[in-house]
Amino acid sequence: MDSLNPRLHIEPASRASSIFDLPTHNPGRSTTEFIEQEGSGSTWTHKGIGILSATFIVISGGSGCNAICSAFPQNQTCYVLPVTDDGGSSSEIIRVIGGPSIGDIRSRLIRLIKISTPQVNSIKRLLSFRLPAQSEQGARDMWRDIIEGTSQLWKDIPPDRKELIRGFLVYFENEALRRAHKAFAWSNGSIGNFFLAAAQLFFRSLPSAIFLFSSITGSEGTILPVLVTNHTVTIAADLSNGKRIVGQCNISHPVSSADAEILEGLEDDDHKVKSPQNVYFTKSAQSDATNLEGTIQRVYYINAHGNEIYPHPNADFLSNLRERQFLVYSCGSLWTSIIPCLALRSVASGIACSPYLKAKILLLNYRNDRETDGYTALDYVQAITNTLNRHDLTPRTAGTVTRPAYPVSAFVTHLVYLSDTPIRVQEEELATMGVSCIAVTSTTVKGGFNAETVAQALDDIISTLDDTDSP
């Protein structure tokens, strides 16, 4: 069922094609008591069930969580990601071809590739590659070498996988050529995005495309798009000054219109085609964005006419909320990465009423960004709580159903923050709401969370809960 076009909702036995659905892992518990994170050089000792035998569901965006992924046992972790990012390479795919945004998902798939052989490393290198951003002609020339199979990027990739990947890249180019009047801009394009978008178009199923990508690359973990749809998904934000901003890129990291290029001689509905400036966005430029004119009051989904809609979440998202032990709201963009995964029907009830969730943990950002300028820790918690309560029962579906709003502790039980964060943390006030605050020390030069810091915080939480449950 398309999340953006809900009908009478009957839980299917299996979504889409059962052959290509991404499998849901439900492994048994491990008895290992030690874990060494790859590349960190550190080892943590675990008490009780520990991280290795715990199961997690992590709500995050594409880049905010990548640095801490190794803190989680991948075969027991489910990552839920939004499909609303309209910046970077994804913006051009959406503009010309359409479909949901796949950039965040591709980023996580790449991050979770386990390098076991030189061949896998070569595949990762290819699917991580971006075409040159400085020259459109240079990007086109390099793209031609790739799809013709002559690029050095194909070195060491087995012939069977090479032809499979190349076939989908050719399919993607064919879809772009069918819409030649829109003049697809190849500069700054992500090869991994092109491959994943082609698979989604071919199968008409994003979960199927994720399964194919994981099968070829050996990506670990379970990755779920928060919405299952073949349509472009758009969010909007209402500001305190009464204005509305449409589109994730415009909310979190707008790019100057001076970066857009007018493509002369090409017309679309009697207007010159303009290459969207969002394609030039880079994460490093996000911190340079000017502050919003007002604070964000809420973020919600809209249709092509600008009207608010109330999509159904991915059914596998709700089922994982019922089965996992620990929910983690990752660090990252609050309003454009975390909130789009929460502003959906039944998610609040899924979190609050889960029979197995032992803790709901918020990793507080090290510093505020454009979306959260001036926020305190309490503001982060209230934004999550208000969003979940608001969207659990929508105006159209609630009818005569009434229930009191869930309390803060139904959604957040622990808040982990870095001891040197400039964000004010109201520990006593949060404690009265049922939220335990845990300070940790950053071990990175630039500050912020890393895998070691997060793993230690999670281990402390798990150990404390395990001790509490012991007779």
Image: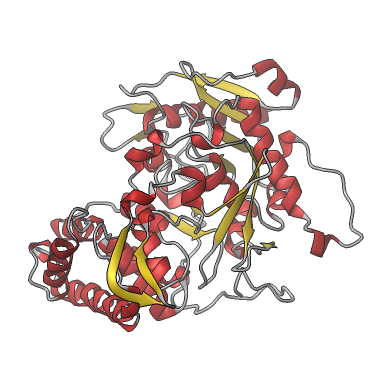
**Number of on-image labels:** 0
Residue lying at 42% horizontally and 77% vertically, measured from the top left: 270
- Snapshot quadrant of residue 328: top right
Residue lying at 25% horizontally and 65% vertically, measured from the top left: 186
- Snapshot quadrant of residue 169: bottom left
| 451 displayed left or right of 249 | left
Asked if one can make out residue 58 in the rendered structure from this viewpoint, the answer is no
Q: Is 353 in front, or is 242?
A: 242
Residue lying at 69% horizontally and 43% vertically, measured from the top left: 242
Quadrant of the drawing holding the C terminus: top right
In this view, which residue lies farthest toward the right? Answer: 400
Quadrant of the drawing holding the N terminus: bottom right
- Snapshot quadrant of residue 160: bottom left
Q: Position of residue 468 (x, y in %)?
A: 66, 26
| 76 displayed left or right of 262 | right
Applied colour scheme: secondary structure
